[in-house]
Amino acid sequence: MVISSPVSGEGKTFVSVNLATIISMMNKKVLIVGLDLRKPRVHAILKAGNGQGMSQYLSGSATFDEVIVPTEIDNLWFAPSGPVPPNPAELIGSPRMAEFLAQARNEFDTVIIPNFHKYNEICGSFNVEWQDYYVAATRARSNLYLISHYDMPQLKSVTDKSYI
């Protein structure tokens, strides 16, 4: 599940952490993936370290198990962003990202990715094949849009706003 919005400060991290917490309270194994490799933030909210994470996994210097850390919340794990790399777009667009998500889907009931607001400018459209649901947060206090990839197979790109 990808949580996104067009601009900074609209509640992507807030929605992601709260949704993950609620799902984990239903005895579901949940993983939050920190993919904001430029300005990591989710680790601070989860009171988790950011020493080793996705940037190392995607560059091949860490394994899946090395970047998955438990949180203080039962059934909730986190993959921190890790140190800021010089090439975040290339790392996120690499085949290792697809491998990571495939393994995460096998080991967790729900995978939540707070998609940072500059992603589409930096990396192009978030690969729709990687997501079952796309949640558009437009100010966390007001509107959330849930778009199911399965219900809308014609959805080609998260930048296509004709469905919202």
Image: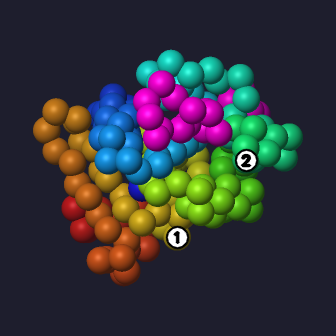
Q: Residue at x 81, y 41 (%)?
A: 62
Q: Quadrant of the N terminus?
A: bottom left
Q: Is residue 39 left or right of residue 17?
A: right
- Mark 2 vs mark 1: which is more N-terminal? 2
Q: Is residue 66 above or below residue 45?
A: below
Give percent across and percent down for residue 162.
25, 68
Give SS at disc 2. Answer: helix
Tag 1: Cα neighbours inside 10 Å, few (<14), some, or many (≥20)? few
Q: Residue at x 16, y 44 (%)?
A: 143
Q: Residue furthest right?
A: 61
Q: Quadrant of the C terminus?
A: bottom left
Q: Residue at x 51, y 45 (%)?
A: 31
Amino acid beneath label 1: Glu
User: Which image quadrant for residue 159?
Assistant: bottom left
Give percent across and percent down for residue 37.
62, 35
Q: How is the image coloured?
A: rainbow
Residue 28 versus residue 10: which sits nearer the camera?
28
Main SS of residues in magenta:
loop
User: Which image quadrant for residue 19?
Assistant: top left
Give percent across and percent down for residue 106.
59, 63
Task: Please state the extent of the stretch shown in magenta in the rendering.
Answer: 68-87
Residue 77 in magenta stretch: yes
Which mark is drawn over residue 41? none
Give the number of callouts. Answer: 2
Q: Are marks 2 and 1 in contact (CB under 8 Å)?
A: no
Tag 2: Cα neighbours inside 10 Å, few (<14), some, or many (≥20)? some
Residue 149 in magenta stretch: no
Q: Which residue is mark 2?
A: 64
Q: Which residue is mark 1?
A: 129
